Image: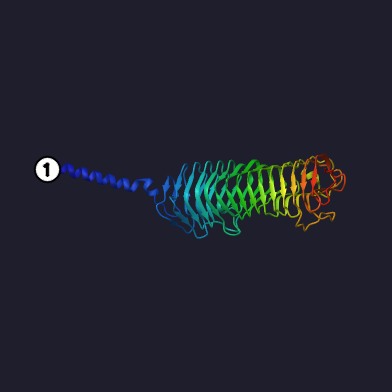
Amino acid sequence: MLRRASTSITTAILAALMTISATSSPALAASTPNCGDTITTNVTLTADLHCSGDGLIIGAHGVTIDLNQHEISGTGTGNGVSAVEYNGLTIRDGTISGFETGIFLESAEDATVRNMSLLRNGDPTRYQTGGLYANIASNLTVSGGTIVAPPATRSLVVEASNGVTVSGVDVTGPVGLSMMTENSVLTRNVFRDGRVGLSETYTSTRIENNRFIRSGIGMSEANKVSITGNHFTGSPIRIVISDEIEIRGNTFRDGEFGVAIGTTAPDVNITGNVFANNRYGIHVKAYYFAENEGLTVTRNTFVDNANAGLFIEATGVSTGTRASVTDNFFMANGFASTDTDAAGRPINDGLHINIPTGSLPTIARNHTIANADFGIEALPPGSVQDGGGNTSTGNPNGCAGVVCR
């Protein structure tokens, strides 16, 4: 009798403990979240979520949301996953689609987004939406996966953030880094059909070893940007009101421009790039050439660009501008020219310069072969400083404004 009673008591205690465990374990509850839940501990999805409004809301530091190859989908409103003022977050391994914003991060430090497909998120009437929107997000890492923006929306928007790294992501649609975002790195990504825009970015932005397809980079009020080792296809770099820009070791093909430089863009250094089959390899145009003080174009190759390998034009008088075009190679440019410069001269040369007398950039050691008209046309006379060592082979009119041997 005593043994049977003891067994009954033991069984009752175990049943009670199991009941308590089943009803109070946060880990179990968090493993099967519902749309609109606030998540305060790590979760791993076991099924897709289809939401009207918000998906999951992070409500604690250090949370990991593992989508486990599942999808959180929306109906065009709300955020797929959002976090405001929480740090040390990870969102990984799944798909978020059909929200105003796929992932929304505000004042979040040390967040990681890894191997996510962010598809068809965005609202064309609101800037702060898209595949991923981050504001004041220090040390944000986005790696692997895919971001595809619907028409007229944005794939990735980062504002007022520091230490952002985007690597190994296939991105379709516009990317925006702005509002004093600093120390960003974009590397080994593919950018398609949407410009990477840098606006009010300061103190080191590095864009390295990416592929740009019908895309490109636009800069306004950008500072200290390094663009190295990228491949641009139909994807120009456009620069205005920006300074200390380095463009080195890239390939530019099949675009309207390789690089276009406008007003107030001092200290642009373009070194060791290849410009092939563009309308213009490099196009530099400002009212005063002094706005491009410190322009350096050196050791680049310009081949088969329709109008000119390198075109420089300014109409306002400025004197003694510190700039140089040296050690470049120009071949077979200008054979499909349709443009004239401000003086009415055809732009169909390897290097074509139309700037006021006394501007005096240094032109030295450039080699020109078989361009449509001039190898180098630098007019009017006295507008440039001949640094010597320029050559012309097979150009119908040789060189003007500098001596070519």
Residue placed most toward the observer, 23 or 391: 391
For the point 45% across and 45% down, the residue is: 64
Please state if 55 lies on the left or on the right of 252 as rendered: left
Indicate the position of residue 144 as horizontal and vertical percent values: 52, 47
**Residue 4 image-quadrant placement:** top left
Please state if 253 lies on the left or on the right of 130 as rendered: right
For the point 36% across and 48% down, the residue is: 28
Residue type of the residue flagged with mark 1: Met
Number of numbered tags placed on the structure image = 1
Q: Quadrant of the N terminus?
A: top left
Indicate the position of residue 13 as horizontal and vertical percent values: 24, 43
Indicate the position of residue 287 as horizontal and vertical percent values: 80, 49
The residue that mark 1 highlights is: 1
Q: Secondary structure at mark 1?
A: loop
Indicate whether 293 appears above or below 279: above
Q: How is the image coloured?
A: rainbow
Residue placed most toward the observer, 239 or 12: 239
**Residue 298 image-quadrant placement:** top right
Indicate the position of residue 313 as horizontal and vertical percent values: 80, 49
Q: Is residue 359 visible?
A: no
Q: Is residue 308 visible?
A: yes
Residue placed most toward the observer, 394 or 150: 394
Please state if 253 lies on the left or on the right of 32 as rendered: right
Classify mark 1: residues with Cα within 10 Å, few (<14), some (14-19) or many (20+).
few
